[in-house]
Protein backbone atom coordinates (compact mmCIF):
# COMPACT_ATOMS: atom_id res chain seq x y z
CA UNK A 1 0.00 0.00 0.00
CA UNK A 2 1.07 3.57 -0.58
CA UNK A 3 2.53 5.28 2.43
CA UNK A 4 -0.40 7.67 2.80
CA UNK A 5 -2.90 4.83 2.75
CA UNK A 6 -1.30 2.78 5.54
CA UNK A 7 -3.66 2.21 8.44
CA UNK A 8 -2.31 3.74 11.66
CA UNK A 9 -2.40 0.98 14.24
CA UNK A 10 -0.90 2.46 17.37
CA UNK A 11 -2.31 0.15 20.02
CA UNK A 12 -1.37 -3.47 20.66
CA UNK A 13 -1.41 -4.71 17.08
CA UNK A 14 0.83 -7.51 18.20
CA UNK A 15 -1.88 -8.69 20.58
CA UNK A 16 -4.51 -9.25 17.92
CA UNK A 17 -4.16 -13.04 18.17
CA UNK A 18 -4.24 -13.17 21.97
CA UNK A 19 -7.38 -13.92 24.00
CA UNK A 20 -8.73 -11.31 26.40
CA UNK A 21 -7.30 -12.97 29.48
CA UNK A 22 -3.87 -12.85 27.90
CA UNK A 23 -3.86 -9.06 27.78
CA UNK A 24 -3.01 -8.72 31.39
CA UNK A 25 0.00 -10.96 31.24
CA UNK A 26 1.40 -9.21 28.19
CA UNK A 27 4.85 -7.88 28.95
CA UNK A 28 6.34 -6.75 25.67
CA UNK A 29 6.23 -3.06 26.48
CA UNK A 30 9.39 -2.28 24.50
CA UNK A 31 7.94 -3.85 21.36
CA UNK A 32 4.75 -1.80 21.64
CA UNK A 33 6.64 1.41 22.33
CA UNK A 34 9.02 0.77 19.43
CA UNK A 35 6.18 0.17 16.99
CA UNK A 36 4.33 3.30 18.12
CA UNK A 37 7.49 5.39 17.78
CA UNK A 38 8.17 3.96 14.32
CA UNK A 39 4.70 4.89 13.06
CA UNK A 40 4.51 8.37 14.58
CA UNK A 41 6.20 10.23 11.69
CA UNK A 42 3.70 8.69 9.27
CA UNK A 43 0.53 9.76 11.02
CA UNK A 44 1.99 13.15 11.93
CA UNK A 45 2.54 13.75 8.24
CA UNK A 46 -0.99 12.65 7.42
CA UNK A 47 -2.77 14.53 10.21
CA UNK A 48 -0.63 17.68 9.86
CA UNK A 49 0.34 17.85 13.53
CA UNK A 50 3.76 17.87 15.14
CA UNK A 51 3.11 15.36 17.88
CA UNK A 52 0.57 13.68 20.12
CA UNK A 53 1.31 13.94 23.83
CA UNK A 54 -1.49 11.71 25.14
CA UNK A 55 0.07 8.35 24.16
CA UNK A 56 3.11 9.28 26.24
CA UNK A 57 1.08 9.77 29.42
CA UNK A 58 2.73 8.15 32.44
CA UNK A 59 1.04 6.04 35.04
CA UNK A 60 1.52 7.97 38.27
CA UNK A 61 2.28 5.77 41.30
CA UNK A 62 -0.49 5.74 43.84
CA UNK A 63 -0.44 8.26 46.66
CA UNK A 64 -1.02 5.26 48.94
CA UNK A 65 2.70 4.69 49.43
CA UNK A 66 3.08 7.27 52.16
CA UNK A 67 -0.58 7.73 52.98
CA UNK A 68 -2.82 6.31 55.65
CA UNK A 69 -4.96 3.30 54.91
CA UNK A 70 -8.33 4.47 53.62
CA UNK A 71 -11.35 2.59 54.91
CA UNK A 72 -14.36 2.48 52.63
CA UNK A 73 -17.87 1.10 52.64
CA UNK A 74 -20.04 -0.20 49.81
CA UNK A 75 -23.67 0.84 49.52
CA UNK A 76 -25.36 -1.61 47.17
CA UNK A 77 -23.77 -5.01 46.53
CA UNK A 78 -25.69 -6.03 43.42
CA UNK A 79 -24.00 -6.99 40.15
CA UNK A 80 -22.25 -3.64 39.71
CA UNK A 81 -21.22 -3.45 43.34
CA UNK A 82 -19.53 -6.85 43.08
CA UNK A 83 -17.79 -5.80 39.85
CA UNK A 84 -16.32 -2.77 41.58
CA UNK A 85 -15.17 -4.89 44.49
CA UNK A 86 -13.47 -7.36 42.16
CA UNK A 87 -11.63 -4.45 40.57
CA UNK A 88 -10.35 -3.50 44.01
CA UNK A 89 -9.24 -7.12 44.64
CA UNK A 90 -12.09 -8.17 46.92
CA UNK A 91 -14.34 -11.15 46.18
CA UNK A 92 -16.68 -13.64 47.79
CA UNK A 93 -15.05 -16.98 48.71
CA UNK A 94 -17.28 -18.82 46.20
CA UNK A 95 -16.15 -16.48 43.44
CA UNK A 96 -12.52 -16.97 44.39
CA UNK A 97 -12.95 -20.75 44.33
CA UNK A 98 -14.63 -20.68 40.90
CA UNK A 99 -11.79 -18.61 39.51
CA UNK A 100 -8.99 -20.72 40.97
CA UNK A 101 -7.44 -23.72 39.23
CA UNK A 102 -4.48 -25.71 40.51
CA UNK A 103 -3.90 -23.11 43.18
CA UNK A 104 -3.74 -20.23 40.68
CA UNK A 105 -6.24 -17.47 40.03
CA UNK A 106 -7.65 -17.01 36.53
CA UNK A 107 -6.01 -14.31 34.47
CA UNK A 108 -9.00 -12.03 34.90
CA UNK A 109 -8.67 -12.03 38.68
CA UNK A 110 -4.89 -12.28 38.74
CA UNK A 111 -4.61 -8.97 36.89
CA UNK A 112 -6.52 -7.27 39.71
CA UNK A 113 -4.08 -8.76 42.22
CA UNK A 114 -1.15 -7.60 40.11
CA UNK A 115 -2.39 -4.01 40.08
CA UNK A 116 -0.68 -1.60 42.47
CA UNK A 117 -1.83 -1.90 46.08
CA UNK A 118 -3.95 1.18 46.84
CA UNK A 119 -3.61 0.77 50.63
CA UNK A 120 -7.36 0.56 51.15
CA UNK A 121 -9.56 -1.52 53.41
CA UNK A 122 -13.09 -2.72 52.72
CA UNK A 123 -14.74 -2.02 56.05
CA UNK A 124 -18.50 -2.18 55.65
CA UNK A 125 -21.42 -3.03 53.39
CA UNK A 126 -25.16 -2.51 53.25
CA UNK A 127 -27.86 -3.50 50.81
CA UNK A 128 -31.65 -3.55 50.86
CA UNK A 129 -31.50 -7.25 49.91
CA UNK A 130 -30.23 -9.22 52.87
CA UNK A 131 -28.65 -11.89 50.65
CA UNK A 132 -26.51 -9.30 48.86
CA UNK A 133 -25.49 -7.72 52.15
CA UNK A 134 -24.50 -11.13 53.57
CA UNK A 135 -22.38 -11.82 50.50
CA UNK A 136 -20.62 -8.49 50.84
CA UNK A 137 -19.82 -9.10 54.49
CA UNK A 138 -18.03 -12.34 53.48
CA UNK A 139 -15.75 -10.69 50.91
CA UNK A 140 -12.03 -11.37 51.22
CA UNK A 141 -9.04 -9.49 49.90
CA UNK A 142 -7.17 -11.21 47.08
CA UNK A 143 -4.01 -9.35 48.05
CA UNK A 144 -3.63 -9.75 51.80
CA UNK A 145 -5.32 -10.75 55.02
CA UNK A 146 -8.25 -8.47 55.74
CA UNK A 147 -10.38 -7.84 58.83
CA UNK A 148 -14.05 -8.85 58.95
CA UNK A 149 -16.44 -6.66 56.98
CA UNK A 150 -19.21 -5.08 59.04
CA UNK A 151 -22.75 -5.31 57.72
CA UNK A 152 -24.88 -2.20 58.31
CA UNK A 153 -28.67 -2.17 58.30
CA UNK A 154 -28.82 1.09 56.29
CA UNK A 155 -26.45 3.50 54.61
CA UNK A 156 -27.30 6.09 57.31
CA UNK A 157 -25.84 3.76 59.91
CA UNK A 158 -22.73 3.35 57.76
CA UNK A 159 -22.03 7.06 57.20
CA UNK A 160 -22.50 7.72 60.94
CA UNK A 161 -19.54 5.41 61.64
CA UNK A 162 -16.29 7.33 62.14
CA UNK A 163 -14.31 4.29 61.02
CA UNK A 164 -15.52 4.86 57.44
CA UNK A 165 -13.59 7.43 55.35
CA UNK A 166 -15.37 7.05 52.03
CA UNK A 167 -18.23 5.20 50.39
CA UNK A 168 -18.92 3.66 47.00
CA UNK A 169 -22.57 3.96 45.93
CA UNK A 170 -23.91 1.35 43.48
CA UNK A 171 -27.66 1.53 44.09
CA UNK A 172 -30.72 2.16 41.87
CA UNK A 173 -30.74 5.56 40.19
CA UNK A 174 -33.56 7.12 42.21
CA UNK A 175 -31.56 6.73 45.45
CA UNK A 176 -28.25 8.19 44.22
CA UNK A 177 -28.77 11.82 45.15
CA UNK A 178 -30.08 11.34 48.69
CA UNK A 179 -27.40 8.82 49.68
CA UNK A 180 -24.65 10.99 48.21
CA UNK A 181 -25.90 14.18 49.87
CA UNK A 182 -26.22 12.50 53.26
CA UNK A 183 -22.74 11.03 52.88
CA UNK A 184 -21.23 14.39 51.93
CA UNK A 185 -22.83 16.06 54.95
CA UNK A 186 -21.30 13.30 57.10
CA UNK A 187 -17.87 14.10 55.64
CA UNK A 188 -17.55 10.91 53.59
CA UNK A 189 -15.83 11.01 50.22
CA UNK A 190 -18.02 9.66 47.41
CA UNK A 191 -17.64 7.40 44.39
CA UNK A 192 -21.08 7.38 42.76
CA UNK A 193 -22.05 5.05 39.96
CA UNK A 194 -23.60 6.71 36.94
CA UNK A 195 -25.99 8.34 36.26
CA UNK A 196 -25.51 11.02 38.88
CA UNK A 197 -29.13 11.83 39.74
CA UNK A 198 -32.71 10.96 38.92
CA UNK A 199 -33.80 14.57 38.26
CA UNK A 200 -32.36 17.99 37.42
CA UNK A 201 -33.46 19.36 40.78
CA UNK A 202 -31.48 16.64 42.55
CA UNK A 203 -28.45 17.46 40.40
CA UNK A 204 -28.52 21.10 41.49
CA UNK A 205 -28.91 20.16 45.14
CA UNK A 206 -26.21 17.46 45.12
CA UNK A 207 -23.71 19.72 43.34
CA UNK A 208 -24.24 22.44 45.93
CA UNK A 209 -23.85 20.03 48.85
CA UNK A 210 -20.64 18.51 47.49
CA UNK A 211 -19.14 21.94 46.91
CA UNK A 212 -20.17 23.16 50.36
CA UNK A 213 -18.76 20.12 52.18
CA UNK A 214 -15.57 19.81 50.12
CA UNK A 215 -15.64 16.02 49.93
CA UNK A 216 -13.87 14.33 47.00
CA UNK A 217 -16.44 13.22 44.44
CA UNK A 218 -16.02 10.88 41.48
CA UNK A 219 -18.82 9.87 39.11
CA UNK A 220 -18.41 6.36 37.75
CA UNK A 221 -17.75 7.10 34.09
CA UNK A 222 -14.57 5.07 33.80
CA UNK A 223 -14.22 6.06 30.16
CA UNK A 224 -12.53 9.18 31.49
CA UNK A 225 -9.49 6.88 31.74
CA UNK A 226 -9.65 5.49 28.20
CA UNK A 227 -6.62 6.49 26.13
CA UNK A 228 -8.68 6.67 22.94
CA UNK A 229 -10.77 9.54 24.29
CA UNK A 230 -7.70 11.35 25.57
CA UNK A 231 -6.10 11.10 22.14
CA UNK A 232 -9.35 12.18 20.48
CA UNK A 233 -9.53 15.25 22.72
CA UNK A 234 -5.99 16.26 21.79
CA UNK A 235 -6.64 15.70 18.09
CA UNK A 236 -9.77 17.82 18.18
CA UNK A 237 -7.97 20.65 19.92
CA UNK A 238 -5.18 20.51 17.32
CA UNK A 239 -7.63 20.92 14.47
CA UNK A 240 -7.54 17.40 13.04
CA UNK A 241 -11.32 17.41 12.47
CA UNK A 242 -11.77 21.06 11.53
CA UNK A 243 -15.09 22.68 12.50
CA UNK A 244 -17.27 20.07 14.21
CA UNK A 245 -20.93 20.49 13.35
CA UNK A 246 -22.54 17.17 14.23
CA UNK A 247 -22.13 14.23 16.62
CA UNK A 248 -23.97 10.95 16.13
CA UNK A 249 -24.20 8.38 18.89
CA UNK A 250 -26.48 5.46 19.66
CA UNK A 251 -27.57 2.51 21.79
CA UNK A 252 -28.70 -0.68 20.05
CA UNK A 253 -29.65 -3.87 21.85
CA UNK A 254 -31.80 -6.85 20.95
CA UNK A 255 -32.47 -9.08 23.94
CA UNK A 256 -34.63 -9.04 27.06
CA UNK A 257 -31.46 -8.82 29.13
CA UNK A 258 -30.36 -5.76 27.17
CA UNK A 259 -33.78 -4.25 27.87
CA UNK A 260 -33.39 -4.85 31.62
CA UNK A 261 -35.83 -7.76 31.74
CA UNK A 262 -33.83 -10.47 33.38
CA UNK A 263 -33.43 -12.89 36.23
CA UNK A 264 -30.94 -11.71 38.81
CA UNK A 265 -28.72 -13.97 40.90
CA UNK A 266 -30.47 -15.14 44.07
CA UNK A 267 -33.76 -13.44 43.13
CA UNK A 268 -35.63 -16.61 44.16
CA UNK A 269 -34.65 -15.70 47.72
CA UNK A 270 -36.16 -12.22 47.52
CA UNK A 271 -39.42 -11.60 49.34
CA UNK A 272 -40.99 -9.11 51.73
CA UNK A 273 -38.93 -10.58 54.57
CA UNK A 274 -35.49 -10.53 52.91
CA UNK A 275 -35.89 -7.17 51.14
CA UNK A 276 -36.12 -3.83 52.93
CA UNK A 277 -38.74 -2.55 50.49
CA UNK A 278 -39.33 0.75 52.30
CA UNK A 279 -35.62 1.55 52.16
CA UNK A 280 -35.54 0.64 48.47
CA UNK A 281 -38.44 2.96 47.67
CA UNK A 282 -36.73 5.92 49.31
CA UNK A 283 -38.69 9.01 48.26
CA UNK A 284 -40.77 7.13 45.69
CA UNK A 285 -44.47 6.73 46.44
CA UNK A 286 -45.40 3.78 48.58
CA UNK A 287 -46.63 0.62 46.87
CA UNK A 288 -46.64 -3.07 47.86
CA UNK A 289 -43.51 -5.15 47.40
CA UNK A 290 -42.96 -6.09 43.76
CA UNK A 291 -40.06 -8.43 43.00
CA UNK A 292 -40.13 -7.59 39.31
CA UNK A 293 -39.73 -3.88 40.00
CA UNK A 294 -37.09 -4.53 42.64
CA UNK A 295 -34.74 -6.39 40.28
CA UNK A 296 -35.67 -4.69 37.00
CA UNK A 297 -36.10 -1.18 38.34
CA UNK A 298 -34.46 0.26 35.20
CA UNK A 299 -37.78 -0.37 33.38
CA UNK A 300 -39.74 2.01 35.62
CA UNK A 301 -39.39 5.78 35.50
CA UNK A 302 -40.02 6.24 39.24
CA UNK A 303 -36.79 4.31 39.88
CA UNK A 304 -34.65 4.37 36.74
CA UNK A 305 -33.56 7.04 34.29
CA UNK A 306 -34.59 5.35 31.01
CA UNK A 307 -32.29 4.61 28.09
CA UNK A 308 -30.80 8.08 28.38
CA UNK A 309 -29.60 7.67 31.96
CA UNK A 310 -28.49 4.07 31.56
CA UNK A 311 -26.86 4.33 28.15
CA UNK A 312 -26.75 7.78 26.58
CA UNK A 313 -25.09 9.13 29.72
CA UNK A 314 -22.04 6.99 28.84
CA UNK A 315 -21.86 8.20 25.26
CA UNK A 316 -22.51 11.79 26.26
CA UNK A 317 -19.72 11.78 28.83
CA UNK A 318 -17.30 10.34 26.27
CA UNK A 319 -18.19 13.06 23.76
CA UNK A 320 -18.13 15.72 26.46
CA UNK A 321 -14.64 14.55 27.41
CA UNK A 322 -13.48 15.14 23.84
CA UNK A 323 -15.38 18.34 22.95
CA UNK A 324 -16.17 20.03 26.30
CA UNK A 325 -19.76 20.61 25.20
CA UNK A 326 -21.45 21.07 28.55
CA UNK A 327 -25.23 21.41 28.74
CA UNK A 328 -27.22 21.86 25.51
CA UNK A 329 -29.38 24.90 24.84
CA UNK A 330 -32.41 22.77 23.94
CA UNK A 331 -33.47 19.15 23.40
CA UNK A 332 -36.19 17.40 21.42
CA UNK A 333 -37.03 13.71 21.76
CA UNK A 334 -39.56 11.24 20.37
CA UNK A 335 -40.06 7.52 20.74
CA UNK A 336 -42.25 4.96 22.42
CA UNK A 337 -42.69 1.62 24.11
CA UNK A 338 -43.51 -0.59 21.15
CA UNK A 339 -42.21 -4.05 22.05
CA UNK A 340 -41.76 -4.71 25.77
CA UNK A 341 -45.26 -3.67 26.77
CA UNK A 342 -46.21 -4.56 30.29
CA UNK A 343 -42.66 -4.07 31.51
CA UNK A 344 -42.58 -0.61 33.01
CA UNK A 345 -42.89 2.61 31.05
CA UNK A 346 -39.52 3.37 29.47
CA UNK A 347 -39.32 3.60 25.65
CA UNK A 348 -37.95 0.79 23.47
CA UNK A 349 -37.19 3.25 20.66
CA UNK A 350 -35.93 6.78 21.18
CA UNK A 351 -34.54 9.58 19.07
CA UNK A 352 -33.20 12.76 20.65
CA UNK A 353 -31.44 15.84 19.31
CA UNK A 354 -29.33 18.08 21.57
CA UNK A 355 -28.73 21.59 20.22
CA UNK A 356 -25.63 23.71 20.91
CA UNK A 357 -26.19 26.88 18.84
CA UNK A 358 -23.27 28.75 20.41
CA UNK A 359 -20.97 25.93 19.28
CA UNK A 360 -22.71 25.54 15.94
CA UNK A 361 -23.37 21.83 16.40
CA UNK A 362 -25.86 19.21 17.50
CA UNK A 363 -25.80 15.69 18.95
CA UNK A 364 -28.16 13.15 17.40
CA UNK A 365 -28.88 10.10 19.58
CA UNK A 366 -30.88 7.09 18.47
CA UNK A 367 -31.72 4.02 20.51
CA UNK A 368 -33.48 0.73 19.88
CA UNK A 369 -33.93 -2.24 22.19
CA UNK A 370 -35.02 -4.42 19.25
CA UNK A 371 -31.98 -4.18 16.99
CA UNK A 372 -28.49 -5.19 18.02
CA UNK A 373 -26.16 -3.58 15.49
CA UNK A 374 -23.08 -1.95 17.02
CA UNK A 375 -21.90 1.43 15.77
CA UNK A 376 -19.22 3.68 17.29
CA UNK A 377 -19.95 7.31 18.04
CA UNK A 378 -19.11 9.66 15.20
CA UNK A 379 -17.79 13.21 15.40
CA UNK A 380 -18.27 14.99 12.07
CA UNK A 381 -16.01 17.90 11.16
CA UNK A 382 -15.38 20.02 8.10
CA UNK A 383 -12.04 18.24 7.47
CA UNK A 384 -12.66 14.72 8.72
CA UNK A 385 -14.99 12.33 10.50
CA UNK A 386 -13.87 10.55 13.66
CA UNK A 387 -15.36 7.18 14.62
CA UNK A 388 -14.63 6.83 18.31
CA UNK A 389 -14.99 4.17 20.99
CA UNK A 390 -12.05 2.19 22.38
CA UNK A 391 -10.53 2.74 18.95
CA UNK A 392 -10.23 5.80 16.74
CA UNK A 393 -10.73 5.87 12.98
CA UNK A 394 -10.40 9.14 11.07
CA UNK A 395 -11.88 9.44 7.59
CA UNK A 396 -11.03 12.26 5.22
CA UNK A 397 -13.95 14.46 4.20
CA UNK A 398 -14.42 14.89 0.45
CA UNK A 399 -14.41 18.66 0.87
CA UNK A 400 -11.32 18.76 3.07
CA UNK A 401 -8.67 21.37 2.38
CA UNK A 402 -6.40 20.14 5.16
CA UNK A 403 -6.09 16.65 3.65
CA UNK A 404 -6.49 17.49 -0.04
CA UNK A 405 -3.08 15.98 -0.83
CA UNK A 406 -3.72 12.77 1.11
CA UNK A 407 -4.86 9.85 -1.00
CA UNK A 408 -7.52 7.74 0.65
CA UNK A 409 -9.66 4.93 -0.70
CA UNK A 410 -13.40 5.29 0.00
CA UNK A 411 -14.27 3.86 3.38
CA UNK A 412 -10.64 3.57 4.46
CA UNK A 413 -9.39 5.62 7.40
CA UNK A 414 -6.33 7.83 7.10
CA UNK A 415 -5.62 7.20 10.79
CA UNK A 416 -6.43 4.21 13.01
CA UNK A 417 -5.71 3.88 16.72
CA UNK A 418 -6.47 0.22 17.27
CA UNK A 419 -7.34 -1.77 20.34
CA UNK A 420 -7.39 -5.56 20.52
CA UNK A 421 -10.55 -6.96 18.93
CA UNK A 422 -10.26 -10.55 20.09
CA UNK A 423 -12.15 -10.33 23.38
CA UNK A 424 -12.98 -14.00 23.46
CA UNK A 425 -13.90 -14.03 27.14
CA UNK A 426 -17.06 -12.13 26.23
CA UNK A 427 -19.43 -13.90 23.85
CA UNK A 428 -22.72 -11.99 24.02
CA UNK A 429 -23.35 -9.05 21.71
CA UNK A 430 -24.07 -6.83 24.70
CA UNK A 431 -20.80 -7.76 26.41
CA UNK A 432 -18.78 -7.27 23.25
CA UNK A 433 -20.39 -3.88 22.66
CA UNK A 434 -19.64 -3.01 26.28
CA UNK A 435 -15.94 -3.72 25.76
CA UNK A 436 -15.83 -2.07 22.34
CA UNK A 437 -17.44 1.02 23.84
CA UNK A 438 -14.47 1.46 26.13
CA UNK A 439 -15.66 -0.01 29.40
CA UNK A 440 -12.83 -2.52 29.78
CA UNK A 441 -9.05 -2.26 29.57
CA UNK A 442 -7.07 0.73 28.40
CA UNK A 443 -3.43 1.23 27.45
CA UNK A 444 -1.20 3.60 29.40
CA UNK A 445 2.55 3.83 29.95
CA UNK A 446 3.17 0.53 28.17
CA UNK A 447 0.63 -1.34 30.26
CA UNK A 448 -2.86 -2.70 29.70
CA UNK A 449 -4.91 -1.78 32.76
CA UNK A 450 -8.59 -1.94 33.63
CA UNK A 451 -10.16 1.52 33.21
CA UNK A 452 -12.43 1.10 36.25
CA UNK A 453 -9.40 0.36 38.43
CA UNK A 454 -7.73 3.55 37.18
CA UNK A 455 -10.90 5.54 37.85
CA UNK A 456 -11.14 4.24 41.43
CA UNK A 457 -7.41 4.75 41.91
CA UNK A 458 -7.74 8.38 40.81
CA UNK A 459 -10.49 8.87 43.40
CA UNK A 460 -8.52 7.33 46.27
CA UNK A 461 -5.42 9.32 45.28
CA UNK A 462 -7.42 12.55 45.19
CA UNK A 463 -8.74 11.86 48.69
CA UNK A 464 -5.17 11.66 49.97
CA UNK A 465 -3.73 14.55 48.00
CA UNK A 466 -6.69 16.88 47.70
CA UNK A 467 -6.39 16.61 43.93
CA UNK A 468 -9.16 16.84 41.34
CA UNK A 469 -10.95 13.86 39.86
CA UNK A 470 -11.61 13.64 36.13
CA UNK A 471 -15.35 13.02 36.57
CA UNK A 472 -15.95 15.53 39.34
CA UNK A 473 -19.20 17.10 40.50
CA UNK A 474 -19.20 19.77 37.77
CA UNK A 475 -18.82 17.15 35.04
CA UNK A 476 -21.48 15.03 36.71
CA UNK A 477 -23.82 18.01 36.81
CA UNK A 478 -23.50 18.46 33.04
CA UNK A 479 -24.27 14.77 32.50
CA UNK A 480 -27.28 14.72 34.81
CA UNK A 481 -28.88 17.84 33.36
CA UNK A 482 -28.31 16.80 29.75
CA UNK A 483 -29.92 13.35 29.84
CA UNK A 484 -32.74 14.56 32.09
CA UNK A 485 -33.57 17.27 29.55
CA UNK A 486 -34.05 14.46 27.03
CA UNK A 487 -36.30 12.55 29.41
CA UNK A 488 -38.46 15.64 29.91
CA UNK A 489 -38.62 16.24 26.16
CA UNK A 490 -39.73 12.64 25.62
CA UNK A 491 -42.35 12.57 28.38
CA UNK A 492 -43.85 15.97 27.47
CA UNK A 493 -43.44 15.57 23.68
CA UNK A 494 -42.22 19.16 23.52
CA UNK A 495 -38.95 21.01 23.08
CA UNK A 496 -37.20 21.54 26.42
CA UNK A 497 -34.86 24.50 26.88
CA UNK A 498 -32.17 24.91 29.52
CA UNK A 499 -32.32 28.14 31.55
CA UNK A 500 -28.68 28.36 32.59
CA UNK A 501 -29.22 31.48 34.71
CA UNK A 502 -31.89 29.96 36.95
CA UNK A 503 -30.69 26.39 36.36
CA UNK A 504 -34.00 24.87 35.42
CA UNK A 505 -35.71 23.28 32.43
CA UNK A 506 -38.33 25.21 30.47
CA UNK A 507 -40.88 23.01 28.74
CA UNK A 508 -42.41 24.23 25.51
Image (cartoon, rainbow, N blue to C red):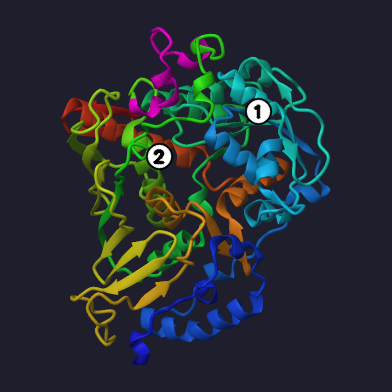
- Of mark 1 and mark 2, the one earlier in the sequence is 1
166 relative to 8 in the view: left or right: right
x%, y% of residue 431?
43, 50
- Tell me if I can see residue 16 in this picture: yes
Quarter of the rendering containing residue 210: top right
Mark linked to residue 135: 1
Q: Secondary structure at mark 2?
A: helix
Label 1 Cα crowd, 10 Å radius (few <14 / some 14-19 / many 20+):
some
Q: Residue furthest bottom?
A: 2
Could you tell me which quadrant the C terminus lies in?
Answer: top left
Identify the residue under disc 2.
Answer: 479
Residue at 38% x, 55% y is 323
Label 2 Cα crowd, 10 Å radius (few <14 / some 14-19 / many 20+):
many
Q: Is residue 72 above or below residue 57?
A: above
x%, y% of residue 165?
72, 30
Magenta residues?
278-299
307 relative to 20 in the view: left or right: left
x%, y% of residue 396?
27, 75
Mark linked to residue 325: none
Viewer-closest of 357 and 173: 173
Q: Nearer the viewer, mark 1 or mark 2?
A: 1
Q: Is residue 365 above or below residue 133?
A: below
- Tell me if I can see residue 187 in this picture: no
Q: Residue furthest front?
A: 102
The answer to whether residue 4 is magenta is no
180 relative to 477 in the view: left or right: right
Quarter of the rendering containing residue 469: top right
Amino acid sequence: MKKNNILRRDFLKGLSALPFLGWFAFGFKDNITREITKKQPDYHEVLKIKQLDSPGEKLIPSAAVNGKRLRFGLVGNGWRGEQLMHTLSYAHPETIEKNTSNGKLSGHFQQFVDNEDLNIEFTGVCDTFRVYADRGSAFQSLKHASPPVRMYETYREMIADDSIDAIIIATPDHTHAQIAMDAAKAGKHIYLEKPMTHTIEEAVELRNVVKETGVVFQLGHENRQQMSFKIAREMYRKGVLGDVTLVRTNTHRNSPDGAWIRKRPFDDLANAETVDWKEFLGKAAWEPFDKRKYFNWQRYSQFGTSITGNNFSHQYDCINQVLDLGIPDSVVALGGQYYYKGHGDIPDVLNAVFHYPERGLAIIYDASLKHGIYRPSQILGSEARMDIDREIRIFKDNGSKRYKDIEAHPGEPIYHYEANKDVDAFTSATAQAYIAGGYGPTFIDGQVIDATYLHLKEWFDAIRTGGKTSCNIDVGFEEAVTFNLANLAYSHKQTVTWDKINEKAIIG
